[in-house]
């Protein structure tokens, strides 16, 4: 089937833009840097929301909704925080027909708002831990934007928690990293990720520790898929989040924040997409199977097959657009990445078969009409595993073990490198950065997250990134 996309090998950034446009995922908004997420892109994001939200609630957090606007003075109450976000902040100075007495910031993130609320809601150790999350939009005035990956306004979830002890806060930040983010990315997105600790240069403004999930894209670059931050007592002191402990003494809380965003949609495209478009993991896909009636005489049987699949718990759509050329419809579904396509035409009906197309493997097979259900079930299970295996193989083949900054620079031109962490904790990180290579994570040899950069035998993952 002829591709309508720029080949990845020719121009990967152009390929990405082509997929976003021609799969009808999103388009640029009327204000520079904003995006309009179209129905198919929104359906994918809603599936991501559902998977992440279920895990967040299983961890014990509850959802809230806080305002879009915050007083500018809030940002200034945590020095590192305001310094880190100042270049990206959008500020409202005129509203209601007059100049505002105090400028209002459109939230770039909500640590300060949650801090102000928690200061009121937390009074005793019995109120802790306080585990909150919200799904919302935020604004960061980016200069160089790309749909889903970096936009001036984007959708995300941001979790914020307060704890009685540093140990409890640290454990919860790691629980989110592993049980929510990594589990969702591996299990549902079929994306292997490296988890680790960020260096001071990459740390979230105001945090004492930032941990991240990093994924490798088809072109060998890294994408930060999600982060979890330990904030120490910085925001608790700035917003006076204190409580009375069991002995009646006043203590400041220990807080965390963590988030994933619509950037995951961009990561999904670049991790699994090919020259024909998207390839959606079956567990995530809004539509797992599309039954395509080639001609009108196949409509009745197409609907019967779809109903049987739906009864078995499969998310299925029937394409009844017989007035549109079949080839055009096939290309559309390829672009959108629906994992399985069941094609049914007059010849198929006459032969008592259907044509089953696996988008992930790129195969076409004829199956008996009474065997469509079993064939679809197998295709969905095998397709999910195939995507993960391919991505894991790419990660392993694309990561070189090196022992010097010079070797890391060479490997980082096309993929990732791992090297002893002490080499990048200082001038080494600056040398890499001068060539556009950043330290993605610091990890233990077993792949787990270190408690500090002082642990022995730590490894650094470095590479180019989005």
Image (spheres, grey):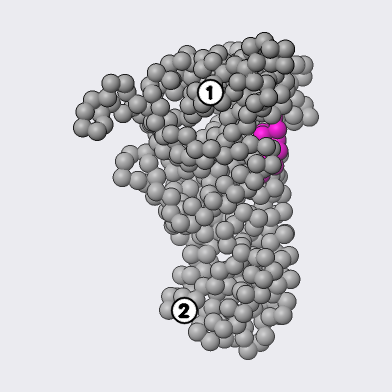
Q: Between 79 and 126, which is closer to the camera in this rendering?
A: 126
Q: Is residue 21 visible?
A: yes
Q: Between 459 and 199, which is closer to the camera in this rendering?
A: 199
The furthest residue to the front: 248
Q: Pointer 1: residues within 10 angstroms few (<14), some, or many (20+)?
A: few
- Which residues, given as a range, are shown in magenta? 174-185
Q: Is residue 381 above or below residue 463?
A: below
Q: Secondary structure at mark 2?
A: loop
Residue shown at 69% from the left, 42% from the top: 58
Q: Is residue 151 above or below residue 433?
A: below
Closer to us: mark 2 or mark 1? 1
* Residue 401 rendering spot, x and y as whole percentages: 71, 29
Residue shown at 62% from the left, 79% from the top: 304
Q: Between 13 and 137, which is closer to the camera in this rendering?
A: 137
Q: Which mark is residue 359?
A: none
Tag 2–tag 1 contact (CB < 8 Å): no
- Disc on the earlier residue, 2 or 1: 1
Q: Between 234 and 353, which is closer to the camera in this rendering?
A: 234
175 inside magenta stretch: yes
- Quick check: 70 left or right of 311? left
Where, by quadrant of the figure, is residue 284 drawn? bottom right
* Residue 442 rendering spot, x and y as whole percentages: 67, 24
- Quick check: 426 left or right of 155? right
Residue identifier under label 2: 322
The furthest residue to the bottom: 350
Where, by quadrant of the figure, is residue 307 drawn? bottom right
Q: Which mark is residue 120?
A: 1
């Amino acid at each position: 089937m002829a591709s309508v996309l720029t080949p990845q090998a020719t121009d990967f950034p152009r390929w990405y833009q082509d997929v976003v446009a021609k799969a009808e995922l999103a388009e640029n908004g009327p204000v520079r840097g904003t995006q309009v997420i179209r129905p198919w892109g929104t359906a994918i994001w809603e599936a991501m929301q559902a998977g992440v939200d279920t895990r967040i609630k299983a961890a014990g957090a509850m959802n809230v909704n806080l305002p879009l606007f915050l007083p500018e003075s809030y940002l200034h109450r945590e020095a590192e925080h305001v310094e880190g976000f100042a270049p990206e902040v959008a500020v409202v100075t005129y509203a209601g027909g007059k100049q505002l007495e105090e400028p209002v910031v459109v939230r770039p993130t909500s640590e300060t708002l949650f801090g102000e609320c928690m200061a009121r809601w937390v009074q005793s150790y019995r109120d802790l831990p306080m585990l909150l999350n919200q799904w919302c939009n935020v604004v960061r005035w980016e200069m160089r934007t790309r749909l889903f990956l970096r936009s001036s306004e984007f959708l995300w979830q941001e979790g914020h928690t307060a704890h009685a002890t540093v140990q409890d806060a640290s454990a919860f930040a790691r629980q989110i990293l592993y049980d929510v983010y990594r589990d969702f990315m591996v299990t549902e997105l079929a994306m292997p990720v490296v988890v680790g600790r960020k260096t001071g240069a990459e740390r979230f403004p105001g945090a004492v520790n930032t941990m991240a999930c990093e994924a490798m894209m088809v072109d060998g670059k890294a994408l930060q898929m999600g982060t979890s931050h330990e904030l120490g007592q910085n925001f608790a002191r700035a917003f006076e989040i204190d409580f009375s402990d069991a002995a009646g003494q006043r203590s400041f809380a220990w807080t965390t924040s963590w988030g994933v965003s619509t950037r995951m949609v961009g990561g999904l495209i670049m991790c699994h997409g090919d020259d024909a478009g998207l390839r959606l993991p079956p567990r995530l896909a809004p539509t797992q199977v599309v039954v395509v009636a080639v001609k009108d005489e196949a409509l009745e049987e197409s609907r019967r097959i779809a109903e049987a699949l739906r009864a078995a718990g499969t998310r299925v759509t029937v394409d009844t657009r017989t007035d549109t050329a079949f080839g055009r419809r096939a290309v559309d579904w390829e672009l959108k990445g629906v994992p399985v396509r069941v094609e049914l035409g007059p010849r198929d009906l006459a032969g008592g078969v259907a044509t089953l197309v696996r988008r992930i493997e790129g195969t076409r097979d004829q199956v008996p009409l009474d065997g469509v259900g079993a064939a679809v079930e197998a295709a969905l299970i095998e397709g999910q595993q195939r995507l993960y295996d391919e991505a894991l193989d790419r990660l392993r083949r694309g990561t070189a073990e090196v022992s010097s900054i010079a070797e890391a620079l060479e490997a980082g031109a096309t993929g990732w490198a791992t090297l002893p962490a002490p080499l990048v904790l200082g001038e080494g990180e600056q040398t890499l950065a001068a060539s556009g290579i950043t330290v993605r994570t610091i990890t233990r040899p077993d792949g787990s997250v270190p408690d500090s950069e002082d642990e022995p035998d730590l490894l650094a993952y470095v590479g180019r990134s989005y």
